[in-house]
Image (tube, grey):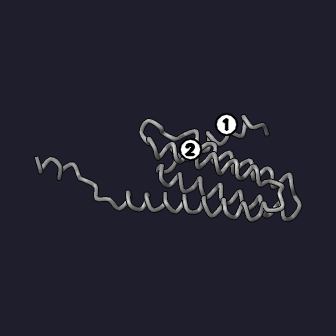
Amino acid sequence: MTQNSMAHRANQAYRSAAVAVPPLKAMVMLYDGAITLLQKAVEAQEARRFEEGHSYLMRATAILRGLSHNLDFAGGGAMAERLYQTYNALILACLRSYGRPHAKESYRRIITGLGELRDAWKFVDATVGNAPKARPADSAARR
């Protein structure tokens, strides 16, 4: 599979998830997917199934690329820029670690970082989900 087709698939997966589930849940699902793929990449490399490990790595980085390409820089401002830098740093770290003696440790750190980002999005989802919602009757009664 070429890089363009993988990037296209990542974009399609992101857009499909965004339509099928609430956006914050989709973010958590995408992070979980990237984490799972990186864990599988480590397992495959340890078992000396290098092509399979590379495939998992490319799929994980495609998810991160999809996330970085779908940021709203106009609405997100500095946060969107910071996430863009973070995603690109994670992609580069993944690619630089592939096939190296320290790959397992590097992937573990990357997975930890992705887990922290995922947990932050879970917290945002829980916070937004628990926010009181104004009912139309309430807002009309206050006028």
- For label 1, the residue is 8
Q: Residues within 10 Å of mark 1 (few under 14, many from 20)?
A: some
The residue under the point 70% across, 52% down is: 93
Q: Secondary structure at mark 1?
A: helix
Q: Residues within 10 Å of mark 2 (few under 14, many from 20)?
A: many
- Front in this rendered view, residue 117 or 126: 117
Callout 2 amino acid: Tyr
Residue 16 position in % (x across, y down): 57, 43
- Front in this rendered view, residue 52 or 108: 108
Residue 108 badge: none
Specify which label sits upstream in the sequence, 2 or 1.
Answer: 1
Q: Secondary structure at mark 2?
A: helix
Callout 1 amino acid: His
Residue 30 position in % (x across, y down): 59, 52
The residue under the point 57% across, 55% down is: 29
- Front in this rendered view, residue 12 or 36: 36
The residue under the point 62% across, 39% down is: 11
- Front in this rendered view, residue 21 or 60: 60
Residue 58 position in % (x across, y down): 74, 47
- On the picture, is 101 further left or further right than 141? right
Q: CA distance from mark 2 to mark 1?
A: 18 Å
- For label 2, the residue is 84
